[in-house]
Image (spheres, rainbow, N blue to C red):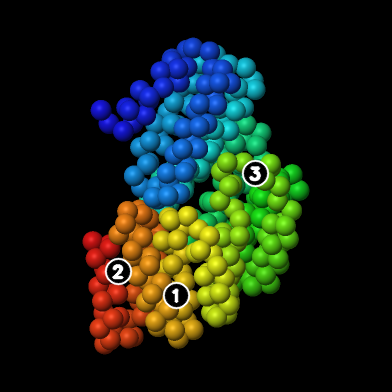
Amino acid sequence: MGVGAQWVAADPAIAAATSGDTVTHSIVDRMAQRVESLRAMEEEAGGGDFLESARTDLRLITGMLENGRYTEDIARRLYTLAAEVCCLLGWMSYDASLHSAAQQHYNVGLRAAKLAGDDTLGAHILCFMATQATNQREQSAAVGLVDAADAVRTRVPAVMRVSLAGHQTTVYSQAGDNRRAAEALNRAFDALEQVDDADIPPYLRWIGEGQLGSTEGRYFLISGQAARATEALERSVSRSTPRDRAVRYGTLALAYRRTGDLDGALDATHKAADLIDQGIHTQRGIERLHEVRTAIATHRSEPRVREAMERITTLAA
């Protein structure tokens, strides 16, 4: 039996609800627990291995919406869950460099969030779409996406304002607008002080000092302040999940290289590679290390640099 089939077979009540049974709050609660478990696994190990499980969850939720019997309140909860899973699928696809699939999932997620009437979830998806666009060097599109998300800034909880301002910082930095990036970073730290744990939806629990430290570090790196970038990124990696550490150590290596600290760059490189060797699946992490490989190539005559470069090449094989 495949992973997807096992996922369905694990809960007959959920499967029955996709075939015409009444969808109760209890069933939606159980479905939400599945989604939360999937999110936790992705944060620990990266999303590549869990794409099929996420697709299965989306099929189950869609089946309930198409075939089940439910109230308007249940419908809103189902559309919210559908949007969450689509966003998770988009993120996992993006992390695996499946960019067309990521865009499709995000677009479906936006429609589901609209049907659920959930401004926070809609803004969250727009921010993730902006991240993908900016890393694809589509800076104008990325700016448009975070500006669209900004339209609901006054209607979302503080934790979403932290996320929004953090994404704006990165997008504006990449677009070369350092003034707007600095303003957004200040808004992010201001909003962080206002966060109420009771108002944090499950899909935003990763927002905190670790994530904001990463944003700050990338801002400093892009704006030419490499020493300050290393300080922020060192704080960030100590507070990150394994999947995020695998990516952020690569960014830290780039920052150390910019300061001229080759030892620091190599140490961070090997820490990133260790995590990937231990089972963290993140194509973004490997791509970041390829940037490091290019950055340290001028020192390839040194055996320790050649060793690091060869290790990076092996990871992508």
Residue 253 shown left or right of residue 301 in the figure? right
Give x and y (percent) for residue 224.
56, 80
> To which quarter of the image does residue 57 belong?
top left
Secondary element at tag 3: loop
Q: Residues within 10 Å of mark 2 (few under 14, many from 20)?
A: many
Marks 3,2: beta carbons within 8 A? no
Q: How much space separates mark 2 and mark 1, taking CA atoms?
A: 14 Å
Which of the two marks, 3 or 2, is nearer to us in this view? Answer: 3
Q: How much space separates mark 3 and mark 1, taking CA atoms?
A: 32 Å
Please state the total of marks drawn on the protein image. 3
Residue that carries the numbered disc 2 in the rendered image: 312
Residue that carries the numbered disc 3 in the rendered image: 200
State which tag comes first along the sequence, 3 or 2. Answer: 3
Please state which of residues 135 and 238 is positioned toward the viewer in this rendering: 238
User: Mark 3: which amino acid?
Assistant: Ile
State which tag comes first along the sequence, 3 or 1. Answer: 3
Q: Residues within 10 Å of mark 3 (few under 14, many from 20)?
A: some
Residue lying at 37% horizontally and 29% vertically, measured from the top left = 7
Secondary element at tag 1: helix
User: Mark 1: which amino acid?
Assistant: Leu
Q: Is residue 284 above or below residue 256?
A: above
User: Mark 2: which amino acid?
Assistant: Ile
Give x and y (percent) for residue 231.
56, 74
Residue lying at 38% horizontally and 24% vertically, measured from the top left = 10
> Can see residue 92?
no
Residue 263 shown left or right of residue 36 in the figure? left
Residue that carries the numbered disc 1 in the rendered image: 254
Give x and y (percent) for residue 155.
74, 44
Please state which of residues 11 and 218 is positioned toward the viewer in this rendering: 11
Marks 3,1: beta carbons within 8 A? no
Residue 86 shown left or right of residue 77 in the figure? left
